[in-house]
Structures are given as structure tokens and as C-alpha cells.
Amino acid sequence: MAATEFDPIALEHFELHPEPVPAEVLGGQEVGMEVWALRLAGGPVRDVLTSDPTNVGTREYVFALPIDVVRNLALALTQVCEREGRAL
């Protein structure tokens, strides 16, 4: 299941946890950096919209994120929520 902008994945669940990840995974960057695991689970949007959502095949994706990327993601999501909150 490859996600594209024309066939996106519907996010059903996510978790964000601090996890030790070897520096080699992040391109050999400094050892001991704080890394978080972002776990996303979901299925194809088309399947969710056209079938019984309980029968949609889901897949889990795990991303290793340095803490600065987590901060940037949080900031971007906060800005979207604030902008959308004003539009209500």
C-alpha cells in the first residue's frame, strides 16, 4: 500500500514515544541524540469511504524523528489547528 496525494492513507491511530534509535539509522548523526518513534496506523481512504471501515486492511508505519523534527511538526499542527479554529 503506497500512499500518494491521489490515493492517501486515512490515519486511524497514532502514537509518539521516546525510543532509543541507533545513530546509523539517522545517517550516522551524533550518538545520544533524543529520538522519538512516531507510529501511524491506517488504511487507504478509498477503502474507508467505500466499504465497511471495520474490514479495511490497515498498515502500521514507524518513523524515527529527532526531537527538533517533533518540535517542528508540533508547531505546524498547532498553527493549522489555530487557523482552522478561527474559521469555525
Image (spheres, rainbow, N blue to C red):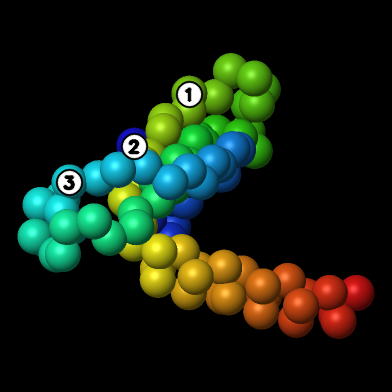
Q: How many angstroms separate mark 1 from mark 3 (CA)?
A: 31 Å
Name the amino acid, label 2: Met
Quadrant location of the N terminus?
top left
Q: How many angstroms separate mark 2 from mark 1 (CA)?
A: 10 Å
The residue labelled by disc 3 is 22
- How many residues crowd mark 1 within 10 Å: few (<14), some (14–19), many (20+)? few
Name the amino acid, label 1: Gly
CB under 8 Å between discs 2 and 1? yes
Q: Does 83 appear above or below 33?
A: below
- How many residues crowd mark 3 within 10 Å: few (<14), some (14–19), many (20+)? some
User: Can you tell which quarter of the image residue 75 is in?
Assistant: bottom right
The residue labelled by disc 1 is 57
Q: Quick one: 52 or 76, which is closer to the camera?
A: 76
Quadrant location of the C terminus?
bottom right
The residue labelled by disc 2 is 1
Residue sitting farthest toward the right: 88
Name the amino acid, label 3: Pro
Residue at (48% x, 23% y) in the render: 57
Residue at (34% x, 57% y) in the render: 34
Q: Is residue 45 visible?
A: no
Which of labels 1 and 3 is toward the front?
Answer: 3
**Percent position (x, y) of residue 59?**
42, 30
- How many residues crowd mark 2 within 10 Å: few (<14), some (14–19), many (20+)? few
**Percent position (x, y) of residue 78?**
67, 73
Left or right: 35, with 53 as reference point: left
Dot 1 or dot 3, earlier in sequence = 3
